[in-house]
Amino acid sequence: MGSPLKNLYSLPFYDRLANTLSRTVPTFDKQKFISGIFTKDFENKELKERMKHTSAVLHSFLPDYYPDAVNLIEVIINRLREDGFGESLEMMFFPDYIETYGLDDYENSVKALEFITQFVSCEFAVRPFILKYGIRMISQMQVWSLHKSHKVRRLASEGSRPRLPWAMAIPELKKNPAPILPILENLKSDPSESVRRSVANSINDIAKDHPMIVIEIAAKWKGISKETDAIIKHGSRTLLKQGHADILKHYGLQSDNLLVTGFIILTPEVSIGRSLEFSFTVKNNQDEKQVVRLEYAVYYQKANGLLAKKVFKISERIFSPQEFCTINRKQSFRLITTRTFYPGQHQLSIIVNGEEKTIDNFSLK
């Protein structure tokens, strides 16, 4: 198991950072900075707590007048680049500084976010500004979507996602994503893969609350380029897993003449820590080729005895007329931090082009 992420904030990191700060921040005291960082409870702080703690300690050495502090941060970042620091997760205390101390200074903070995100992403820090300034901030992000730097363009799409993971929610954008659609429109053919993936993730966020908006986007963008088609496919992943009829139709994923036979759960009793094994055969039972998307769903038993469905993709490809294929698959029940397994009856189903073709039970011990 690797070292916890919080250990990115280590003595070697702070020692090196302090050396740069010593050459850029007037009256900076390295020993005082290191002492301020390594308080008695430092070891107990998790990643985000250490990040915010670093921001607070840095604040004590920067000018009290926020615009002057922002200007000095730009100098610091330029020197960090000269000293060999690249974009890395531990530098996220800079965006946090803007979020924490600059929320009431829109103009200076917008300039700072635009600059800092080219060193370390500001996708989390920009969200409080969206909440506070609403359409004014969204309009600025639309301007950023045309920026020469792909990192600023990515901030426009990633920072405005309605459901950005690990970040504060933007309830108004979940209710009505219309204000961010021009941003996505500007970026649909972006040359940067990271920007295009961000656009796809934003579309997938929208799909969870407004599937028909995504269906309309899919129809509008279809065939513009292979890259744009890939954005739509990735952005439609939730709808595809849900078997949404309109997105299945968009991709020609009909299932009437696709047959599933020989479905068997090879391990009807599975111990936690081991793997479920199953097999089935799928056939394109028609005289023309057909795109076949194969998935399976595990209905996990929850603490209250109810079942919760999770879909897993197997493959998606063209089947020739009358072609068949036998699939053998394993699903791990190894203990992981993101899921709790409960013993008892579970279910497994086979899904072909969005249609659940067959289902059976198995027991988890």
Image (tube, helix red, strand yellow):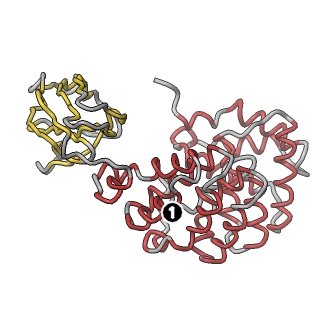
Q: Estimate the x, y position of residue 126 in percent, counting from the top left.
A: 63, 62
Residue 235 lies, in percent from the top left, at 46, 52
**In the orientation shown, which residue stands out farthest toward the front?**
287
Q: Residue at left 58%, top 54%?
A: 224
Q: Which residue is rendered at x = 33% and y = 37% of the image?
A: 313
Looking at the picture, does residue 29 appear above or below residue 274? below
Viewer-proximal residue, 30 or 348?
348
Examine the image and state in which quarter residue 108 appears. bottom right
Instruction: Say which of 9 and 204 sits in front.
Output: 204
Q: What is the count of numbered marks?
A: 1
> Residue 29 location, x and y as percent?
84, 45
Q: Quadrant of residue 315?
A: top left
Q: Nearer the viewer, residue 5 or 202?
A: 202
* Disc 1: CA contacts within 10 A as few (<14), some (14-19) or many (>=20): few
Identify which residue is drawn at 56% across, 47% down.
197
Q: Quadrant of the C terminus?
A: top left
Residue wearing tag 1? 220
Residue at image point 69% right, 47% down: 191
Question: Above or below — where is 237 with respect to 342?
Answer: below
Quadrant including the N terminus: top left
Residue 261 point in image, percent of width and height: 12, 30
Q: Secondary structure at mark 1?
A: helix
Q: Quadrant of residue 209?
A: bottom left
Type of amino acid under label 1: Lys
Left or right: 215, with 199 as reference point: left
Direction from residue 32 to residue 186 in the image, left or right: left
